[in-house]
Image: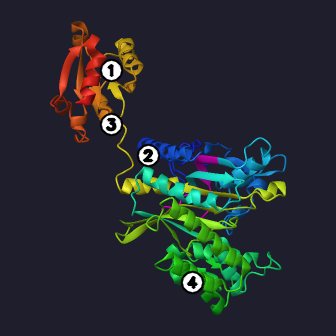
Amino acid sequence: MSRDKSGEAKQRHPHAGTPKGFRDYFGTEVTERKTMLDKVAEVYHRYGFDPLETSAIETVEALGKFLPDVERPNEGMFAWQNEDTDWLALRYDLTAPLARVAAQYRNDLPSPYRRYAMGPVWRNEKPGPGRFRQFYQCDADTVGAPSIAADAEICAMLSDALETVGIQRGEYLVRMNNRKVLNGVMEMAGVLDPSEPSRYDVERGIVLRAIDKIDRLGEGGVRALLGEGRRDESGDFTKGAGLSPDQAEVVISFMAARRDTETKTLTALRDLVGASIIGAKGIAELETIAELLDHQGYGADRIVIDPGVVRGLGYYTGPVFEAELTFEILDEKGRKRQFGSVAGGGRYDDLVKRFTGQSVPSTGVSIGVDRLLAALQTKKRAGSAIAGPIVVTVMDRDRMADYMSMVAELRNTGLRAEVYLGNPKNFGNQLKYADKRGSPVAIIQGENEAKKGVVILKDLILGAQIAENATLEEWKDRPAQVEVPRADLVAAVRKMLVQ
C-alpha cells in the first residue's frame, strides 16, 4: 500500500473499467435488442415453439467439452471448483443446458419438445475487435425429432426471423451442409476410420475448427492449420492437424465444392465422398431438405447448399446451417467487406444421450443477437429510438409534493415521466439533462405559475441539436413553449406529443 507525504496509508481505489473482452450495454441498445428479440419470439411462437429459461451456471460435466477454443484455460469455459468438489461453469451456449433439461424432465415434456431461449452466454476465448467473452444468443430447438423435416423447418424459420426483424430478401443467405458429408470426405482423406470412430478425434477437431475459420484466415491460414500449424500476428502458435499436402487438398476441394446450382454441387460432393457410406447418407439428407424447402417456397435466393459450412462446435452429427448477411460494410480501416454470419446451428443427435444413454435426435439454431443488432443498426433498421421520459423540472424544492403529483398524473395515464432529482439550483442544467435523456417535453412551474394555476410546457424535440454549452438565455429562446392551465396538464402534454 502506498503512503502520502505524512506517512499515512493512501486508500487504493479500484479501477473503473470493464474486464478485457466484456462490455456494458446502455439504454438505447438494450431497448433495440428487446424490440428485435420480441419480433424473433413472435416468429418462433408462430412455429409452435415455447419459451424456456435455464440457469446461467451449469456443472462442467453437464456442459461437456465441445468448444472450439481448446487452447484456453478450462477448454474455453469460465469454470471454478465448488465447495462440494463439483466443477461449475458459466454456460457457453444455450444448447448444452437444453440437453440437460431434456434429460432431467424427459418424463414431463412432450416429445418432440420445441423450445426457444434468449440470454447471455460466456466463453473464455481470446478477445479481439468485435469478439467478446460475453454475448447474447437467441436459440430455437426441436428435441426428439428424427425427421430431416425438422432441420428444414429450422432453416425456414431462421429465414422468416431474419426478414421479420428487417433483413431484406437478397441481403442474406441461409447456407446448409451436413457433417456426415464432411465425415465422408475425411474418410477419403484418411482421417476417419469407420471401424474405429474415435481414432482421429483430435485431428478431426482441428480440421473442423480450421474450416470454420476460412472467412477470417483465408485459404492459406486454413492450409497451415490442416498441416503443421499456424502462428498469428501476435506470435501465438496454433497446432495443426498434421495432414499431408494430399490429405489437405481433399479437404480444401470439399470447401470449394459449391457450384452455381444445387444439382451440380451435390454431384461434386458425390465425387469427393466416393464410396463412403456415411458421406452418401449425408448427401441424401441434403437433397431431402432442399426438396422440402422448395415445396414451401424457399428457393436458392434464401437457402442454399454450401460445403463451406461446418460449424466449429464438436457436437453436431448431421445437417448444419449458417445465416450469412451478404451486404457490404466498411471495416475499421475503411475497407469494404461482407458483414458475415449472424446465426448458425445444426443437428446434434448424441447430446442428450450423454445423460440418458439413449439417442435423442435433436436440431436447432442460434442467432448471434449482438451481431444481428449491429447489422440492423448499420442499415438503420434497429427501430426508432424510444423517446425519453417527460421531465418535470423543480423550480422550488419546497414544493416537491406538487411536482410528484404532476408526474403521478402523467404516469397514471400511461405516459413515461420523471421528476428531476438532481441539484435543482441551476435550471439550465435541468433542461440540459432533459435534452440528454431524449425527453420530448419539459414541464415547468415556478412560484408565479403556481399562483396563476398554470404550467409551462416546453417542446424539446425541436431543439434536440442544441449545443452542449447552451446558456439559460438560449434555452429561453427556444420555440414551442406554451402555458396551459394546471388542470389541463395531461391533455396538453398528449397534444404536444402528437404534433
Give the alpha-carbon distance from disc 3 to disc 4, as whole Å: 57 Å
- Eye-nearest disc, 4 or 1: 4
Q: Amino acid at mark 4?
A: Ala
456 or 350, nearer to the observer: 350
Q: Position of residue 179 (x, y in %)?
A: 66, 71
Whole-number angstrom distance, CA of label 1 to CA of label 2: 29 Å
4 or 2: mark nearer the eye: 4
Mark nearer the viewer, 1 or 2:
2
Q: Position of residue 299 (x, y in %)?
A: 47, 65
193 in relation to 400, above or below? below
Q: Residues within 10 Å of mark 4 (few under 14, many from 20)?
A: some
Q: Earlier in the sequence, mark 4 or mark 2?
A: 2
* Residue 145, percent from left and from top: 70, 55
The residue mark sitting in front, 1 or 3, is 3
Observer-nearest of 469 and 348: 348
Can you say whether 195 is above or below 102 in the image?
A: below
Dot 1 or dot 2: first in sequence order is: 2
x, y percentage for residue 132? 54, 58
The amino acid sitting under disc 2 is Glu
- Badge 2 is on which residue? 29
Residue 349 versus residue 210 in the image, above or below: above
Q: Earlier in the sequence, mark 4 or mark 1?
A: 4
Q: Secondary structure at mark 3?
A: loop
- Tell me, yes or no, if residue 36 can be seen here: yes
Label 1 to label 3: alpha-carbon separation = 18 Å
Q: N-terminal of the two: label 1 or label 3?
A: 1
Say whether residue 444 is left or right of residue 132.
left
Specify the segment rendered in magenta.
115-132
